Amino acid sequence: MTKNEAIQRVNDALGSPLLNERNTHWASVVAHAGDEGWWIHIPLLQFKKEIHILLCSEKAKVFRHLKIKASEILSPAMKFRCKDQVADIFISAASPRKLADILPGGTKHNFSKHIVSEYRF
């Protein structure tokens, strides 16, 4: 599954071209420090607009669509570890129901409340 294929699949399911290259972040599961999960890098200014995140697991043959509403996270620089005005987020795949950012320096934000839907492929 690629980012463009996933965007098309979500847009088809929604019946409108809501997701696009600019408002959608894509991550596949990777190994990190003895864990597996998704790396996401979101410029802090993007939190003022609606953000879509697609988390893909090739092993499980599934991807999840998450949506963060415009200004829903008011102080992302205080919520996530940041580098150069970009939120640096690692969501562990060990607990796919929790979907929490586990990087030191963050607040362990739980992304499960942002899940819109799950797609199998």
Image (cartoon, rainbow, N blue to C red):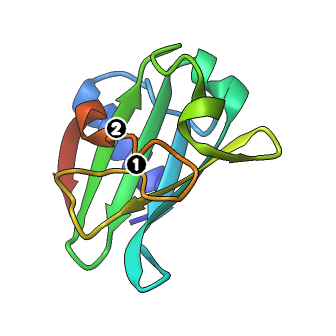
First reached walking from the N terminus: tag 2 or tag 1 = 1
Q: Nearer the viewer, residue 47 or 23?
A: 47
Residue 81 on image: x %, y %: 62, 48
Helix, strand or loop at label 1? It is strand
Residue 34 on image: x %, y %: 42, 86
Residue 66 is labelled as 2
Q: State which quadrant residue 18 falls in.
A: top left
Residue type highlighted by circle 1? Leu
C-beta proximity under 8 Å, tags 2 and 1: yes
Helix, strand or loop at label 2? It is strand
Circle 1 is placed at which residue position?
A: 54
- Residue at 32 percent across and 41 percent down: it is 110
Residue 8 on image: x %, y %: 39, 43
104 up-or-down from 28: above or below? above
Residue type highlighted by circle 2? Leu
- Residue at 53 percent across and 45 percent down: it is 25
